Amino acid sequence: MLIADGDPSMKIGVLALQGDFEEHCGCLTRLEVDAREVRLPSQLDNLDGLILPGGESTSIGKLATDYDLVEPIQKFAKSAPVWGTCGGLVFLATDVGGDQPTLGLIDMVVERNAFGRQVDSFEEDLEITGLPGGLFRGIFIRAPKVVKVGQSVSIICELKGGSIVAVRSGRFLATSFHPELTTDTRVHEYFLAMVEKALRS
Amino acid sequence: MEKGTETLKRGHAQMLKGGVIMDVVTPEHARIAEDAGACAVMALERVPADIRAHGGVARMSDPGLILQIMESVTIPVMAKCRIGHFVEAQILEAIGVDYIDESEVLTPADEQNHIEKTKFNVPFVCGCRNLGEALRRIAEGAAMIRTKGEAGTGDVVEAVRHARSVIGEIRRVSAMREDELASYAKEIGAPLELVIETSQKGRMPVVNFAAGGVATPADAALMMQLGVDGVFVGSGIFKSGNPSARAKAIVKAVTHFNDPKILAEVSQGLGEAMVGIGVSQLPEKERLADRGW
């Protein structure tokens, strides 16, 4: 069952500074959505939504600052949905403990590399609130976790031990794991449904 | 909960795509690399140019030094072991490095066998000069590939040769009929199922970086335009006049590899590049790329 029908007129940007942006574009293309790589502010024009991919959040933050993308993305996000995976989740947070530049779009405190180094990376079946079709396979790679959220933020997925790994805050979605590394497109469809809703309103 | 799966090992390399991995020999270097936007660092006792100059047997670095580097940055830390030296690999896994490079830059420990890499939880990256070599390494469990180039020279010619060879062969294999793949697999000495996978995907089955001789932002962008997923820079940064500025410029050049205006901006005022050695002047027995099979 599709959560959202792929709408070919929908244009979704994927921040392509560093990380697995091609994998996100591949998922969007499979859902028959127009995927656009974003490296410069002007490339945000006419997009309906934006995905911040996984990657090294320090690299992405520095490149975004050097090419003046932080403010334009914040402005874009005033009306359009944004989803961050892993490093993208870090980039969306208000507080990541340190002086790393972030967008500050979701009121949350994030701990980077919260589960340890690469040898501690793991896969786990997840129950995600609002996602139909049963469990979702979560791929966690040197993943961050959300340690505290503000009142505007709903927690939509926790691990058994209580670690927060997915949140929703209005137009914004953040996941510690990587749906783009699986063949299951349900979280991408969930995000596209958010974009459709924003376009209608 | 599952750990050490192929998805996790290959997936970590997918997070490094579009990025620059820099060789560092001290915690201070590692912080300069992180500040410049490197997506990972390779912790070493000596950069390849110094390994060349020093001569003798080149081995895994002191684990104590690698640990100091791991403590000084939050980005992933890779380290090298000798080809076939599975105990060096066990040691590197035990201290928790994020990726192991089974590298021809160090003196090989085994002239017949590479490490059986599927047994490890930590992922491996291996060098290659052509598609057959790449797919043999993937069959042994490598989760990431880098074209070898010629490390420690600052001469990009071998990096170009190896990237063109790999990417050209991928193009050829993608255009083949299904019934031609078995004989091609035999010709290049690669497992048939990986040749089929490459043909179907039209790309290397795992992430493929370029390495060995990248010294300028233009070199890095050249490799990206040839079709690799990212770039390793070894001696090119810390053997240059202004490592910090050069490191930042190479990071930007890899992101904006298709934008000559930005490449022109970032290439300015970087001071001296590493002096380098022309590969054509290098005696054959000093070429590192011929190690590994």
Image: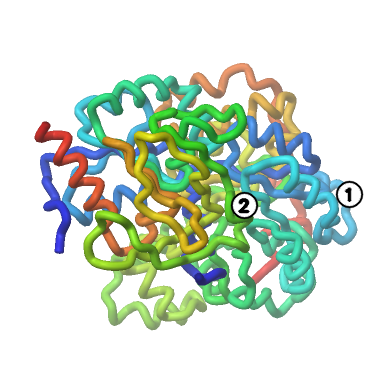
In the image, taking residue A186 as reference, residue B264 lies left or right, namely right
What is the quadrant of residue A150 in the picture?
top left
Query: In the image, is residue B143 above or below residue B208?
Result: below
Q: Residue at x 60, y 49 (%)?
A: B211
Q: Which residue position is annotated with label 1? A: B54
The image shows residue B65 at horizontal and vertical percentages of 83, 49
Tell me if residue B218 can be seen: no
In the image, taking residue B149 as reference, residue A151 lies left or right, namely left
Residue furthest top in the image: B269
Q: Same subunit under labels 2 and 1?
A: yes
Tell me the element at label 2.
Answer: loop
Indicate the quadrant containing the C terminus of chain A: top left, top right, bottom left or bottom right. Answer: top left
Q: Report the front residue among B185 and A118.
A: A118
Label 1 is placed on what type of residue? His
Q: Residue at x 62, y 77 (%)?
A: B119
- Which of the two discs, 2 and 1, labels the residue nearer the N terminus? 1
Count the labels in the image.
2
Q: Residue at x 27, y 67 (%)?
A: A134
The image shows residue A45 at horizontal and vertical percentages of 24, 25
Q: Report the front residue among A174 and B6.
A: A174
In the image, taking residue B224 as reference, residue A169 lies left or right, namely left
Res A53 label: none
Indicate the quadrant containing the N terminus of chain A: top left, top right, bottom left or bottom right. Answer: bottom left
Q: Residues within 10 Å of mark 1 (few under 14, many from 20)?
A: few
Q: Which residue position is annotated with label 2? A: B149
In the image, taking residue B273 as reference, residue A106 lies left or right, namely left
Q: Report the front residue among A41 and A50.
A: A50
The image shows residue A57 at horizontal and vertical percentages of 52, 39
Label 2 is placed on what type of residue? Gly
The disc numbered 1 marks a residue on which chain?
Answer: B
